[in-house]
Image: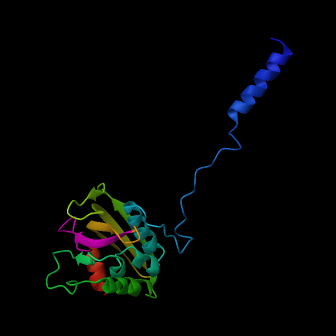
């Protein structure tokens, strides 16, 4: 093999093993713990639950409220929360957006709150609601961990949510049903709402 062929082969192998300096790198996911205002414009229904998780983790009341339907932006939908049916005679009957904001505000204004962490599992794919145009539903299991100075509590259950596009073509939650995943586990999201109402 001549020297020129060897040099060409070495140069070729060198460049073949290098990454392209002009290639686009993968976008890094947002660091929701260091940022207090992660909110993606909900042009897709899937974005709403991501925003809900960010708002909880970042303790951001404004972004939390944006996850729910605004009656000023839709004429046919109002918010409805159907609580865990194991709670009888509940103060959660006729729960409103204002109640939703108040309970979350009470949590994040607690002097002893250290962190909130929400995870989803067994999420169903979004299904069109045939009787309502531009409306979808999904269900998922949740684990909601609240850590306070003295203790931590996990709230578990299943949620069924319905979402709709508003007049700005942005998705929001208009229906939220909370169910227990086990009769033996007492702490559902409804219990948390009742506790901090």
Seen from this angle, which residue lies furthest left? 88
Q: Quadrant of residue 47?
A: bottom left
- Residue 41 seen from this side: yes
Q: Quadrant of residue 8?
A: top right
Left or right of 41 in this view: 180: left
Name the spot of residue 41 as percent of width and height, x first: 47, 67
Q: Quadrant of residue 187?
A: bottom left
In this view, the residue in front, 68 or 122, is 68
The segment highlighted magenta reads 171-187
Say whether residue 185 is magenta: yes
For the rendered model, the colour scheme is rainbow
Q: Quadrant of the C terminus?
A: bottom left
* Residue at the image position 54 percent from the left and 59 percent from the top: 29
Does residue 2 sit above or below 145 in this rendering? above
Count of numbered circles in the view = 0
Name the spot of residue 112 as percent of width and height, x first: 45, 85
Does residue 83 sit above or below 124 in this rendering? below
Q: Quadrant of the N terminus?
A: top right
- Residue 196 seen from this side: no
Does residue 121 sit above or below 179 in this rendering? above
């Amino acid at each position: 093999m001549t020297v020129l062929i060897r040099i060409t082969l070495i140069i070729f192998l060198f460049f073949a093993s290098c990454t392209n300096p002009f290639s686009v790198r993968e976008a890094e996911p947002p660091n929701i713990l260091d940022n207090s205002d992660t909110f993606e414009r909900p042009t897709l229904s899937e974005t709403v639950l991501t925003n809900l998780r960010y708002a909880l983790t970042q303790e951001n009341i404004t972004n939390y409220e944006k996850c729910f339907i605004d009656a000023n932006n839709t004429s046919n939908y109002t918010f409805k929360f159907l609580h865990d049916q194991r709670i009888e005679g509940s103060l959660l009957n006729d729960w409103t957006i204002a109640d939703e904001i108040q309970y979350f505000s009470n949590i994040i204004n607690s002097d002893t709150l250290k962190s909130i962490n929400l995870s989803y599992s067994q999420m169903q794919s979004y299904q069109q609601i045939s009787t309502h145009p531009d409306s979808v539903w999904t269900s998922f299991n949740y684990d909601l961990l609240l850590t306070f100075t003295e203790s931590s509590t996990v709230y578990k259950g299943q949620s069924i949510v319905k979402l709709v596009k508003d007049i700005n073509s942005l998705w929001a939650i208009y229906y939220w049903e909370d169910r227990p995943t086990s009769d033996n586990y007492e702490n559902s999201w409804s219990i948390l709402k009742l506790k901090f109402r």
